[in-house]
Image (tube, rainbow, N blue to C red):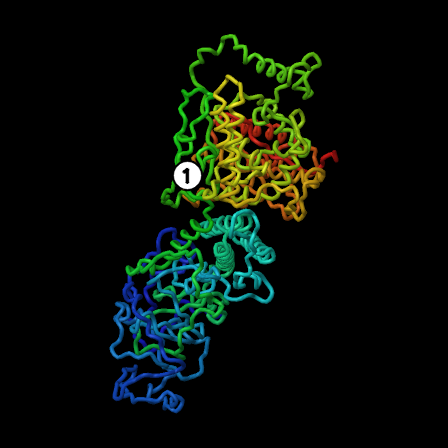
Amino acid sequence: MANRWPPRSPSNTPSSTSSSAPSSTSPSSFLSPSLSSFTSPSTSPPTTPSTCLSVLATPSAGDEIHLKADEKVETRDSIVPWREFDVMELDKVDPSCLTQDPNVLPPYNPADDPDAVRGLHESGAILRRTKLQTLDISTIQAFEGMAAATGFSSLSVFTTPNQSWVPEFAVAHGEITTYADGRWGRFEYSRWPQAYARDCLHVACIPRKPPSTSSPSVALWRTLTLQDWKREDCGVVGVGFLAKECLKDIEDEASAAIERFSHCRRDRREWNQVGKCIITWLRLALDRLRILPAPRGVAISLAAHVQRLTFELHGLTVLLTTVLERIESQNDYTSDVLDVVGTHTWDPSVAQVLFRAGVPVWFQQPLTNRLSIYKVVTKTDVPLDFSTTPAYPRLVLAKRDISGVLNTAGEWFRAMHAVVRRQLCGSSLPELSRQEPDGDSRPCKRLREETSHPKEWSSSLGPPAPAIVLRHPQDANVLGHSIRPAMTAPSHPLSRRNKKPARRSRRSHDKQAVLLSPLTTATGTPPETTRDVRVFTMNPFRQFYPSRSVFVAAAWSGALSSAGPLSQPAQSATFYYPPPWLLDSLIGYDNNPDKIARHLHHLAAIRTFCRLRLFDHTVAGRPLTSAEWRDALFGDYDVDRLQDDVASTSASSSMSTSTSAPPSARMAFRHKLRQNLRRLFGGVASLRSYDAASVPRFAGHVVTYQTALKDKEIQRRLVWEAHEINWRCELLSLDALIVGSKDWPEMIRWIHESDISRVWGASSSGMDVAPRTDGGMQPFCWMSPGEEGWEACRGHLQAFLNVLSRWPGCPADLHHNPEVALHCTAVEYSQLMDRAVTFYVRTFISKYQRLPIPPARVESLPST
């Protein structure tokens, strides 16, 4: 191609004015984004924020001319009097009335005009067509108008050298809001040109329409409607998911965009970092859309934001693969205009660079009579398929921003993204502060609920008092709830520690002795000589019991077995999801098949609400105790029977003869727990009580009571899900507690949680704690050497070591070189995994005084 850089000057122009404009934006400045706000050039823009807010003067259609009789217009060679023309007579106008030779009118450069540089318009200037000859795309200059329309005021004009239309550009003088289709109206940067910002150049490179052969496909341009949302019967009224076909199309397009970006050049560190941030937001929004049911307006807005971020990633790919190379080269690409969204600017140097690179550009400049304009057009508004009905709930960035601050290039873009991340992608309300217990407290004394949960839902106190919560950007945690650290044991010995146990406690000592005997520990059954003594079964969060339904890797079972049995924790152990032992048949632990079947059957009906609670603190999402989960799975939510239960509780209390504690107080407390749990599941969530005849669906199967009792596949998948959700949540919670990530900036925290998600699967987001059940089981990440496919687990172990390396007390061999897991021998790999799991288990016990729930797998199990 011919070399046209810098722009050529007219031969008849003096050398003092023929030089190119002093560039405030050199081509090299396009190669990396600015992390700070856009810095204006040394020259003042032709319009000020107050001018931008002026009423827009809409031009007439076509080549309409508005001139007063006897008005004179200065041209290059002479002053020619104008007469008033009728619009229909335009084609009859003698070209000599416009200029003596319109074909040799020199290209106008605003940098050559002192008045234009100062932002002044020419007195009496009229927007009109000044070029009557046929347009030659190879000769048009950056500041000439293939098409032109009025600017933000009657004193300015938008010209474009490579487009035949002028958009109705957005001005942030009112609200920036989300509409019913999830788009932002004229501020929809993925479909509509916006003001140029140096650190948002990739937005101008977003594809304008679906290509015929390559990615992206037409699914990204699909206008989402309310019919694309399907209600979900999960117990929470008015929530649902995006239709499966629509969600799959969006997920496929997002995955394709991420894959395409991964093959881009990696030598642009700043732009690559922008891509990493976009991918983090995209994965978080996808997980939010896939996992959590939401109201119709929220789901549609979130799906549109996924489309928006996917477009943005495609634009970044075009920037890295095409536009930056064009900017760096000295070739002329003005005749090879890219089919992208483009941008508008008032900076002459920016307009020159983008025009030469073949990027659609609209240049705002002062209105003068020396402009070269081929066609005057009426500005085009957004497409008709854009909704004009505000979404509910509304996402409003600013109301009546009369200061014009949001009109600063790129400012509204960053602000709107922050609002969407907090209101759509932020998964929970901020966790309310809690007073940590004192270490001098008695280790087995029950904590007072009034001091441990003063401002959230409590199983003993019920719903919290109304409160106004002010949200800070740093509080948009993915997992908004943490397991409360257990009280530390007292440093001084208790006064009665070494005394002989009282008579009433001797039996418990005998039970403990039977449980801890070597024969009992090895076989799971007490020895023959102690059959007359009732065996005491320790809770599974204090001692590890193998499962009959799922397989736990040897590294995990060994670490958990060697860590137990543990002493009774100082406070009730809590869990994010129903503990697996309430759903599973454990070796050496009391099992009731009928009760387990009832739990499994009812879990299939309430599991969506249980998953929703992980992220939504507004439905009392804090972790529940084992007893609370047992009541929830039993499924008695009949709030109408409260008074009957009170009467029966009082009657049974009066018949009790125990002397260990006041029976009325103990049973009343237990009754209060049960009643508040009924109000939560039966009142707040509107869940129905357990019905043996119900037929909920799980993983594409209809689950009946007989299915839950006999179908091993359904049993294993529900137990596996309980293992997986609890294990992922516990890892996130423990890491946040140790490294203090709750105080990190929002973006840094989300990237960190995305790195943690690589421990259990492909890198996604911290919200990916609830595994998918609509497809096949995902691969197990904890295979030992010798098992088929264990080599694929190396990356997951490396990610696990990266997490542990941040923790205090991490062994040196785990801390210094996590990448060793990728290339070590099989023996070294086994040793590395054993040490890593042991360190994790030991750290978890030190913080929570209970055993962690391990990951498990379903494959390769015996049929019994």
Q: What residue appears at the point 44 percent right and 82 percent down from the top-left corner?
A: 134
Q: Please tell me which residue lies in front, 71 or 567.
A: 567
Residue occupying image coordinates x 52% and y 46% = 686
Q: In which quarter of the image is residue 543?
A: top right
What is the x, y in percent for residue 389? 44, 64
Relative placement, left or right, of 673 versus 464 is: right
Residue in the image at 47% along x and 49% along y:
425
User: Between residues 237 and 13, which one lies in front from this camera angle?
Assistant: 237
Q: In this view, does 235 lie above or below 406?
A: above
Q: Is residue 267 among what the camera can see? A: no
Q: Which is more toward the observer, 46 or 286?
A: 286
Pinpoint residue 260: horizontal percent, then vertical percent: 56, 55
Q: What residue type is labelled 1?
A: Pro
Residue 821 image point, x, y percent: 59, 34
Quickly name the residue at label 1.
464
Task: Please provide percent x and percent y for residue 122.
Answer: 26, 76
